[in-house]
Image (cartoon, grey):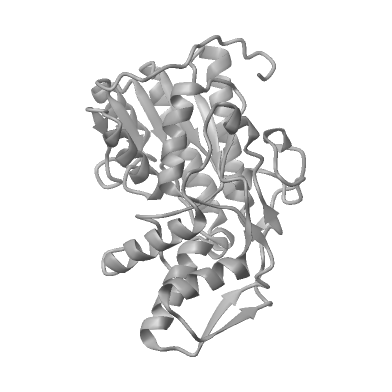
Amino acid sequence: MTAGDRLRYTPGQLDRNAPFYVAGHQGLVGSAIWRKLEASGFRSVVGRTSRELDLKDRGRVFDFFHEVRPRYVVLAAAKVGGILANTTYPVDFLSDNMQIQVNVMDAARKVGVERLLFLGSSCIYPKFAEQPIREDSLLTGHLEPTNDAYAIAKIAGILHVQAVRRQYGLPWISAMPTNLYGPNDNFSPQGSHVLPALIRRYDDAARAGKSTVSNWGTGRPRREFMHSDDMADACLHLLEHYDGAAQVNVGTGSDITIREVAHAISAIVGYDGRTEWDVTKPDGTPQKLLDVSKLAETGWTSGISLEEGLERTVAWYRHHVTTVRT
């Protein structure tokens, strides 16, 4: 509990009939949460596409909340991307995410949303944080420069949640997922994260019969990967079992090198060519492994192995290859 946070709230099963708004319901995380909520019996799950509701438009966001009056909210909407996108458009990643977060949380607070779960990212932690990264590592060191703008926006979101708890007494919480992947991910060569980018690259190479695939960096950085369906399960669990001002790390508790995951993906898609590593390109943070002991204390652990998750994601990508976000 942070200084000044004296909120007392007992978590329990959420009302399956109450309006539940999932911001960003068509994205990687939001769509997984939507599937989880429907499978868990929620009967009034609400979503709006970005065309229907621009979350950067403050007036329209407030109008939406006054109309729907959700009792629960998961804030999964965000502008996201990999190293290339973050380094090329830092203003967009900072400004867009700050506007989305502030508008949604201010509107949610105005109508008295009971439970709000804000989703951040493991990039909020210092570049050289002690591994595995504990929640109290936040704001103890310098951020990774390739995604510092995005990280600052997410840190602001955590502080916003904590401020609402202190000032308004609403039992809102934050969760910081590790690197996520799964259905409805962004597979764009320019805008995607490392795992969907690798899936597309190797699958394209296998289809085209290419002899060589080139990846950024050395391949030595270690990353923790979690399937979005696992993340969705953890989100509902936290809403029903956790209350506190501190953010909760959500991950699998194990990591793998980029080289190793590239090899695993190439095998799954059936690519038998050569992989080269462009060491002139940045690696990013050397390691990001989350300490998930706080999450485990609430009674939840990851249930989808990386091998199973990769196979499922490759199969989904191939089935939707003509319609995926590119």
Q: Percent from the top left, x then y, of residue 47? A: 27, 37
**Residue 251 against residue 58 in the figure, above or below:** below
**Residue 239 against residue 123 in the figure, above or below:** above
> Which residue lies at the image location 31% right of the left edge and 23% below the top edge?
70
Q: Is residue 207 left or right of residue 89?
A: left
Q: Percent from the top left, x then y, of residue 233? A: 42, 37
Quadrant containing the C terminus is bottom left
Quadrant containing the N terminus is top right
Q: Is residue 27 left or right of residue 154?
A: left
> Which residue lies at the image location 69% right of the left edge and 55% below the top edge?
287
**Residue 232 against residue 92 in the figure, above or below:** above
Q: Percent from the top left, x then y, of residue 127? A: 72, 51
Residue situated in front as seen by the camera: 210 or 83: 210
Q: Percent from the top left, x then y, of residue 18? A: 27, 20
> Which residue lies at the image location 45% right of the left edge and 43% below the top edge?
230
Q: Is residue 55 left or right of residue 219?
A: left
Say which quarter of the image contains residue 64: top left
Residue situated in front as seen by the camera: 311 or 55: 311
Q: How many marks?
A: 0
